[in-house]
Image: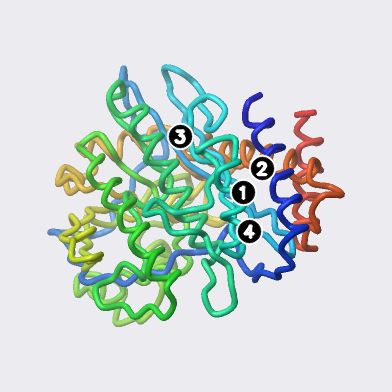
Amino acid sequence: MEWKKNLESAINLIAEAKKNHNVRVNNEGNPEHDIEEKVMSVEALGDISPKTFPLNYFHVYNKKIASLDSSSRYLRDLSVNTCLVGLAIFSNVKRFIDGPIDIKTPYMAISSYSSLLKDIENKLPSNLIRVKNRIDYYYVNEPGNEYKIDDIADEIRTEAENLGLKEVIKDHDYVILDGPIYPTPLELTEGFPLETETRKMHRVAYASLVSERIQSLNDKVVSVVKRLENSRKIFSVDEVKKIVGDVNARDVTILEIIDEKYCKQKSSYICLIGPFKIQYKLKVEHEGKVVLDNVPPKYSYYVIIRLNKDLSPNFLRIESISEKMVEEPENNEYLHIVLSSISLKTLLPSYIELVDKESKRVTRSLFIYAYEFSSGKLNIIHDDKLTYIKDKSEQVLEGEL
């Protein structure tokens, strides 16, 4: 496969360049990191009283539906950080489409001292392997000016997802994204202070990718946010206070209170709270030009899914930039699309579970291949050795070998 040859070539280039550059980079980072954000305002639209439905209430017929997600892994050497990214698309027409295997998506980014990056830049086998961000700034990792590997992962994943969205949006009736409808990281907030040049250049590159995402969105696109552990959006909304009281808490805690007081039943159910209108104040300028500004509001419902009263529920937020999202649940096309099939194992919408699992499988394959080829060539850090052991065991258990 082409991606395997390209990974081999890139790793060989890194190993050779290391001989001429005695450098040490910062390896801190977490592929599963949360993105911090700052909300400008959250507004309840009409009656947001909890509404409960049977688990099989929502349905859809004869629609072409696609979903997509990305995943990342880090392969870090004492001198070089690399980020590997896989994309998964599921279509009920075309089945799985994986990037970079079936479609061309960026799948590797390299960060180190600028001198090392410049040595290998023109020798890299593919433009899908990156040493620069989209505004041609090197992924520098030098003392006092470190391009964080988490920031690199956010950029590469967003670009891959944007390409995946363009791949399916024209010939499907609906596309479901895993994650926010568009990213709203704290560093894109107007006036947010950034100390280093790398952070400032990341800000511009990321803003460009978010702008690209927003321009690609239309009434076909909806998203599912499944990680609400650190979200604190609705506790201050007056209508929410009328339901749960004056509770300064995370969204998950609010939903737990609502579930206990208003939704909980003996049998399986879906409980909906909303709709809400969420607005952000994002603004990024670069060299006198506006990169990102006046982002559209997100319209959303919060979702509680429970199999029975003795098992823990799952919490989600479903988002769209379309005002159709504010329709009542019974006639809300987005809710019917997303909630038409629920996995009884994970309590996730099936379209999301499929691409979540597949994107992780693709990235795992990239990581394992890169790790095994780099053995004896790179000095991989201990954390990534542990990740390899875990990923390899999972690969064997799932019979991929």
The residue identified by callout 4 is 116
Query: Could you tell me how many numbered marks the image carries?
Result: 4
- Is the C-beta separation of discs 1 and 4 under 8 Å? yes
Which mark is drawn over residue 11? none
Give the camera-side residue of 12 and 119: 119
Q: What residue is drawn where x is 75% and y is 51%?
A: 15
The quarter in which the C terminus is drawn is: top right
Which callout, 2 or 3, points at the residue further toward the start of the chain?
A: 2
Question: Would residue 294 be found to the left or right of residue 54 on screen?
Answer: left
Which mark is drawn over residue 351? 3
Which callout, 3 or 4, points at the residue further toward the start of the chain?
A: 4
Question: Would residue 361 be found to the left or right of residue 199 on screen?
Answer: right
Q: What residue is drawn where x is 50% and y is 57%?
A: 152
| Label 1 SS | helix
The residue identified by callout 1 is 120
What residue type is disc 2 on?
Answer: Ala
Q: Is residue 158 depicted above or below 60 in this figure?
A: below
What residue type is disc 3 on?
Answer: Tyr
Q: CA distance from mark 4 to mark 2?
A: 13 Å
Mark 2 or 3, closer to the camera:
2
The residue identified by callout 2 is 10
Q: CA distance from mark 2 to mark 3?
A: 34 Å
Mark 3 or 1, closer to the camera:
1
Q: CA distance from mark 3 to mark 4?
A: 42 Å
Q: CA distance from mark 3 to mark 1?
A: 40 Å
Q: Position of residue 355 (x, y in %)?
A: 51, 36
Question: Would residue 288 be found to the left or right of residue 35 on screen?
Answer: left
- Is the C-beta separation of discs 2 and 1 under 8 Å? yes
| Label 3 SS | helix
